[in-house]
Every structure is written in structure tokens, then in C-alpha cells.
Amino acid sequence: MNIVKPQKMNLEQLEIALLNNVNEDENLSYNIFQNEECNNINLQQLEFEHCRFSNIIMQKAKLEKITFSDVIFENCDFSNTDFIENTFIRCEFNNCKLSGCNLSEDRLYNVKFFETNMNYINLSNASIENILFEDLQITNSYFQETKMKKIGFKNIDLTQAQFFKTSLNGIDLSNSKIERIAISIEDIKGAIIDRFQAMDLLYLIGVKIK
């Protein structure tokens, strides 16, 4: 699928900055944040535009009402961080850790997640459009009333993911793992699966294989 990549990203234009020195209501543009540890940090009402986050460790943090536009995250660890009412536009997550993150009620548009650990992530009540999940784990994840449009799953492990009132109509799951996912017949209706995956969904109609 066609994901619009972060725009105007030139390493030579980026100025080194520190997340620990960021002030509330600040607009940060053309900055690179790298090799920094800022666990339990609390950031609010910020705008990051044309920025790069590299080798950032930000565990158990709280990021509230922040807009990320044309931002690349690479080799970052955001484990168990709360992203509250944030917006991600034309962003990429490459080889990151988002395990246990809360992205409920966030808005994501034109975002790519590649080789990233997203186990136990919560995307409930989020609005996600034109999103590509590629070569990553998203097991035990939680989707409740998630608005999904133009979503690509490519070689994804969705084992034990939970979907409630979240339609997968038109989404291709055929090259992903869907063992023991929790989903209703209504939500899985219209999804694309292969014949072997169909065996994992027989429980929905009360059928057992002998």
C-alpha cells in the first residue's frame, strides 16, 4: 500500500536537541533527539515537525496532546508509555519498542510501523487511517471501537489480539498469524484470510475439528 513518507527529512538540516530541555507548548522543528534516556518524563501540548528520534529510551512516560508531523522514530524504546490524545501524521517507527503502550483515542494518519515490538499495545477508540504494519509483533493487543481505514498487515503476529466493535472488513490477514484472536463474526466479516487461518476461526460458529 502507498504510505506517504515523512517529508523534507534531511539530516544536514536537523539541529541536535534534548527532550529533557523541552518546554510545554513549544513547537520544535528540524530537530534530532538522540542517545537520550528520559524515563517517566511528562510532556504536554507540544508540536514536533520534521524531527528524528534516534536511540531514545522513554519508558513509562506520559505524552499528552502532542502532534508529531513528518517524524521518524528509529531504535527507540517507548515501553509502557501513555500517548494521550496525540496525533501522528506521516511518521515512521523503525525497529522500536512500543510494548505495553497506550495509544487509545489517538489519531494516526499515514504511519508505518516496521520491525517493531507492539505487544500488549492498546489502540482502543483510536482513529487509524492509511497505516502499514510490517514485520512486527502485535500479540495480546487491544482494539475496541477502533476506527480503521486502509490498513495493511504484512507478516504480522496478531496472536491473542482482541477486537471488539472493530471491523476488519477488506483487510488482508492472509500472511499474518491470527491464532487465538478474540473477535466476533461481525467484525471478521469481509476480512481476507487463507484456508489454514479459517481453522483458527471455526470457534466462532461453535465447530470443533475431530
Image: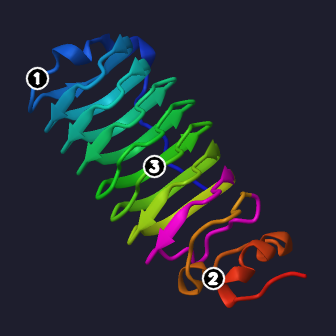
Return the residue at label 2. 190
Which of pointers 1 and 2 lies earlier in the amino acid sequence? 1
Is 173 above or below relative to 115?
below
* Residue 210 appears anywhere in the view: yes
Amino acid under disc 3: Ile
Return the residue at label 3. 121
**Camera-side residue of 93 and 198:** 198
Kindly indicate the quadrant of the structure image that contains residue 43. top left
Look at 46% across and 59% down and name the residue there.
Answer: 142
* Residue 14 appears anywhere in the view: no
Q: Of discs 3 and 1, which sits in the foreground? A: 3
Look at 49% across and 48% down and name the residue there.
Answer: 120
Q: Which residues are magenta?
A: 156-175
Distance, label 1 to label 2, CA atoms, is: 46 Å
Look at 40% across and 19% down and name the residue there.
Answer: 56
Return the residue at label 1. 23
